[in-house]
Amino acid sequence: MLLQIVILLIGLVLILLGANWLVDGSSSVARRLGISEFVIGLTIVGIGTSAPEMVVSFLSAFQGKSAMAVGNIVGSNIFNTLMILGVTALVAPMAITKSNLRKDIPLNIVVTILLILLGRSATMLGIGTTDSVSRLEGVLLLVIFGIYMWSTFKGEKGEKEESVENNIKPVMAAVMIIGGLAGLIIGGRLFVNSATQIAQIAGLSEKFIAITIMAAGTSLPELATCVVAAAKGQGQLALGNVLGSNIANILLILGGSALIHPLSFDGITLMDISLFAIAPVLILLTSMTFKKKELDRVEGAIFLCLEIAYMTYMICTI
């Protein structure tokens, strides 16, 4: 098992380095094309930090491992909301704007509920014979993601920041993008294969590994980005990164994974589904607790405690 653990860690390092290179290289290209920092943060950084989840879920789907593909995203979104926002709020309270309340948070809730209804269509709606997301439903998720991206760019004011530093040369940016993608693909394959072997050796289910170790590991780019942003007083960037990543995880990553191979939800428990649905709603509720609309340190601590309780439950029910 020691060899598999070493390979898993090597894969994780490659995933994290690859994501970092991909984000930095893509951001440099975007700046040179005159795209504003706001759109860069919402799209490139948000999707870029979700690249590890994308690689792990896509590779899992290619290998027919639905439990890993779905469990990785369910676990990642729970981790993003409770652990990352919890830790980030402890570093510095995050303001919740009217724009967040009108678009970003409601959309996060809607796409989460949509995925649950699609994934549990047989049990909850009596549609079909199995609880799974089909290829056609995967296309639907991808179309919604495309509309979301289009509306984001359409709503961009087009105000360019003149003093944006860009010390990365075009050739170096291209190398970083290609190297980042290579790191993500190779690291993702090592990570998925070693995690599967560890689960089999330890007698654990693939779903358990996916929803805990994989989910936390692939969410490290979001965690690092959000903590640094909060420390620099950029709480909106941190909140936007989490919301954008959660939306991309469901619409782009699970949509694409379902297109590769239909995704079964049989391994996802009621507890997983419940917390998956409740987590984004909690963000909305935090804006209604007091007159000051923000996610403060007390609420951040509550989020963190919920994630720890969930992880403890997962370990105790192995």
Image (spheres, helix red, strand yellow):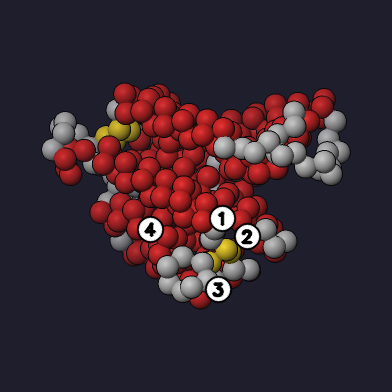
Q: Distance between the residues labelled 3 and 1?
A: 14 Å
Residue at numbered disc 2:
235
Tags 2 and 3 touching, CB below 8 Å: no
Q: What element carries label 3?
A: helix
Amino acid residing under circle 1: Leu
User: Residue 225 — which label?
Assistant: none
Return the x and y of residue 12 as percentages of the image width and height: 60, 44
Q: Above or below — where is 317 with respect to 30?
A: below
As drawn, is 115 to the left or to the right of 284? left
What's the amino acid at mark 3?
Answer: Arg
Q: Give the residue displayed 25% in from the left and 54% down from the top.
A: 270
Give the crowd class for mark 4: few <14, some 14-19, many >=20 residues within 10 Å.
some
Mark 3 or mark 4: whose residue is earlier in sequence: 4
Query: Hey, what amino acid is under mark 2?
Result: Gly
Whether tag 1 and tag 4 are in contact, CB under 8 A, the answer is: no
Q: Mark 3 points at which residue?
A: 297
Q: Cα distance, mark 2 to mark 3?
A: 13 Å
Q: Give the SS element for disc 2.
A: helix
Residue 281 marker: 4
Please provide percent x and percent y for residue 108. 42, 48
> Which disc, if any, is residue 239?
1
Residue 315 sits in which quadrant?
A: bottom left
**Which badge, 2 or 4, is on the more N-terminal residue?**
2
- Callout 2 environment at 10 Å: few (<14), some (14 to 19), or many (20+)? many
Q: Residue drawn at (42%, 40%), measured in percent from left and top? A: 250
Up/down of 294 relative to 66, above or below? below
- Measuring 42% from the left and 27% from the top, which residue is drawn there? 143
Residue sitting nearer the eye, 129 or 141: 141
Residue that lies at the very extreme toward the left in this rendered image? 126
